[in-house]
Structures are given as structure tokens and as C-alpha cells.
Image: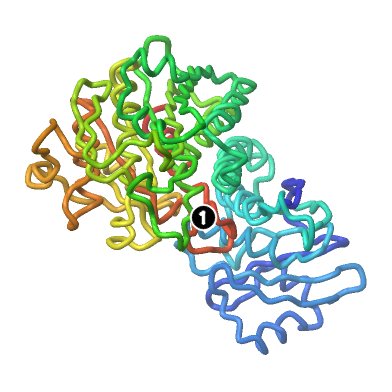
Amino acid sequence: MARRLNIAFSSIDLPKSGAVAFLVGENGKLSPAARRFDSDGRLERAKSIAEFKGKIGASVDVMAPRDHIDRVILVGAGGKEIGEPDWMKIGGAAVAGAGSASSLTLVAETDGAEIDKAAACAIAAGAKLRAYDFDAYKTKDRKVRPALKLVIACSDPAGARKAWKDMEAATDGVILARDLVNEPPNVLGPVEFAGRARQLSKLGVQVEVLDDKAMRKLKMGALLGVAQGSVRPGRMVVMQWKGGKAGKAPVAFVGKGVVFDTGGISIKPAGGMEDMKGDMGGAAAVTGLMHALAARKAKVNAVGIIGLVENMPDGNAQRPGDIVTSMSGQTIEIINTDAEGRLVLADALWYCQNRFKPQAMIDLATLTGAIMVSLGQHYAGLFSNNDELATRLTEAGQATGERVWRMPMGPEYNKMMDSKFADVKNAGERWGGSITAAQFLERFVNNTVWAHLDIAGTAMGSPKNEYSQSWGSGFGVRLLDRLVADNYE
């Protein structure tokens, strides 16, 4: 279970008990507070023996250095040019080093450098995310750790306390997204996911759930075609946060929510199929984002739409060769039933742009393995019909550490999605698979300013770091929260 953190901010002072963390710059020099504490040179000796150079996120433990202090954790803070993700790594490393301590004071200062309130809050966010652990279904070897009182001693505790409210909202949104991705597929079906999304109404989010009947009435044949192979009915959830000026066009976010993907009739290999419980990472991120915006009372009108289905291969499942009619009226030839996420998004995107006329629309989807071939697991693929939106997303990614890389689009790729028998086919040739998938989606956005984020490599099973040890990363929540804060409020 996640370790409970009670986070507070104070002025810079040496603690009288518990554990303490000091920051060490890349030159290996202790902070002023650490030097005051280190009257007998024990910290300097420990640092020297460990050959500790202050690399960001690295740490050294010194046990029982004083009668009243349980342990000291020296945490690397790198050089002067460090950003939010680096401060988060520092917070995560400090909490990891605290072990079973019940209290930890992190003295947020480096030699000659003042750490502002934003950095202090990022340290707190990294600490809270590092404390996350999803072991709800373990009955043995479950980690039971006492709550940790974390005090971040900084130069502007009052300012940090105020700023933390917004960053904590985004952090809690990440945790919600992680929980959704980590849940087993027998527990979290489309109906159950929709129920989780309904809980956002407690924060003031207006939540509608479209069932089979409503989607059939809207002629969402693409989404329903994916859902028809499962005994679990599909759902579409529409979430609205109205924090901006009345009548102002919203910014919209659309998420792929395939709660489990067998591949359908084009069934996947058995090896690793259990990971397909995470094929709803886009929907999880949108849900977490709507939580973040509402919890911090963002001054924006925002819409979140998630298409929820299960892709199964029963006797009623759609077949390769079938032709379905999407809500847009465009017909789609099914070439591969494992190219199902784009079918869900086709109807969700069309519904979103048609109903809400958003000023910008961004979809997130664990869409293609091809994007991992291109970018690995450190960047999400970015596709867009608008340079300004693409630039804003790139800048938000650099600021938060949830990085995106823009990929090409063009008529040559679009032509690869033409069908012999329908308006478009749902799978192209072998090459450029992530690009042709994006070209398919673009056919359902009209002239709306739009971007597509392929998060197949970053939403689940992505590389661990100092503030993310979870299989489900919650990727996209902080990225899009920053995008909104910087550009749409």
C-alpha cells in the first residue's frame, strides 16, 4: 500500500529528532546547514568514502550520526541548472533513503543557492509519488510502513505551502491514473471505470456516461464494433470542468480506454498479454487530469472524454474484412482487429469536436508498438496539425519531464490508409505504423486544432526513476496540467 505522507513546510533549521536529508551539489560540497550539523566531520568522511559527487538523485546514508538523529541522508542536487523533474528526483530519493523512519526533515538548500517555492513543491511531489505502491491484492509480503511526517525546510515556507495546493492536485491526479492502470482487468471493466470517473463529481466535475443505447443512437459504429466481442458493454464518459469564462470554448482531452486488449480475432501472442490491462492508459491520464484541474480549481473550461471498451475474440467479435460506419459517416474497413484503439478514438474525437467545438483537442492513447521502435520508452510520440500546439506540448514536456517528440505527418502517409472497399482502413502497411495510425485519427478531427500523443512506451512498464517505481506511470497528467496552466488559463 502507498505509504502515507504528512507533508509540511518550515523555515530552514536543523531538526531535533528523526531523520534528516541534506543536499549536496555536484561539486560535492555540503550545504551550509549540513556543515553546521557536521561538527565532527562524520558526513564529510562518509561522503569521501562513498566517492559521492552529488549526482542528482544519488544518495548516501549515515546511520545514527547524533544521539537525537536516527540517520542522515545526503542527496545529490547536481548543478545550478536543474528543473522540476530533478527536484522531484531529489524528493523521491530522500523518501527512499528514509527507510522506516517516522519523520524526515529535508533541508532544501544548496551551497550558495536559494531554492524557491516551486522547487520545494517539486521535492514534495517527488516524495509523494515515490511513496506510491500498488499492492492492494497482496496477502503476503505486503509492505506495511508507518506514516512519514515529511518536513521540507526552505526559504519561503509560506509561499511553498500555498503553491503546494496546486501541485498536490496534479500529484494526486497522477496517483489516480496509476491506480487505474494498475488495476487488474477482471476488476476494472468499462462499467467499473465509468464508475470511478463518476466520483470526480465530488470535485465539481460534471460527468455523463453514455451507454450502449446512447452510443447506438449516436451511430458510434466504430467504437461499438470493438466492444461487440465482449460480454462487458462499452461506455463513453464525458467529463466537464467549467472553471473559465462562461461561453469560452473549452480545451478538450480524449483518451483511449481499452480496459483489456486480446487483439480480438487478430489475437495477440500469449507472452506479455497480461500487460494489456494497461491499454487504457490514455483514458486513465485524462481522468487523472480532470481530477487535477478540478482539485486546483483551474480557471479553464475543459472537457475530458474517454471511450471504454474491452477487445475480446468471442463468436460475436468483429472480423478482418468487416466494414463499420463511424459516427462521422465515414466507413472503415477492418484489416486487423488489434488496431482497435483508433476505432474507439475515431468516434470519441468526432463526438468531441462536433459537440463541444473545442479551441484545441488532444488525444492520448497507448496506440502502437511502432512508437516504441521509434522512440523507446523515454518520449511519447507527438503528432499534430498545428505547430503552435505542438510547440506548447513540447515545452510542457520539457518542463515536467514528461517529454514528447514530434513525428511527421503528410499526404503520402495518409494515402497509405486508403481502402479498396471503404473510405478508410484501420491498419496500414508495416512501415511507419505510428504515423499511419495518426493519419487515420486526423480524418476524424475536421479542422479542429488537434494533437495526438502515442503513449504506448511511457504509460506502462516504462523505466523507473526516483519518483516512479510503479508499473503504471500516470504519464500525461502533469504534462497536460502544465499545458493548461501555461497556455489556457
Q: Residue at x 92, y 73 (%)?
A: 67
* Residue extending furthest toward the right: 67
* Residue extending furthest toward the bottom: 49
Q: Residue at x 57, y 46 (%)?
A: 178
Identify residue for label 1: 274
Q: Residue at x 38, y 43 (%)?
A: 365
User: Picture coordinates of residue 25 (x, y %)?
Assistant: 57, 71
Q: Is residue 470 visible?
A: yes
Side of 411 where 50 appears, left or right: right
Depth check: give the residue in front, 382 or 212: 212
Depth check: give the residue in front, 29 or 487: 487
Side of 382 where 154 appears, left or right: right
Q: Is residue 360 visible?
A: no
- Residue 268 lies in quadrant: bottom left
Mark 1 neighbour density, 10 Å: few (under 14) some (14–19) many (20 or more): few
- Residue 169 lies in quadrant: top right
User: Picture coordinates of residue 26 (x, y %)?
Assistant: 53, 74
What is the total number of numbered labels drawn onto the structure image? 1
- Taking 244 as reference, is 253 above or below it? below
Depth check: give the residue in front, 2 or 170: 2
Q: Residue at x 57, y 75 (%)?
A: 54
- Residue 13 lies in quadrant: bottom right
Q: At numbered mark 1, what does the secondary structure look like: helix, strand or loop? A: helix
Name the quadrant of the C terminus: top left
Side of 62 where 54 appears, left or right: left
* Residue extending furthest toward the top: 247
- Taking 270 as reference, is 71 above or below it? below
User: Picture coordinates of residue 14 (x, y %)?
Assistant: 79, 61
Q: Amino acid at mark 1?
A: Glu
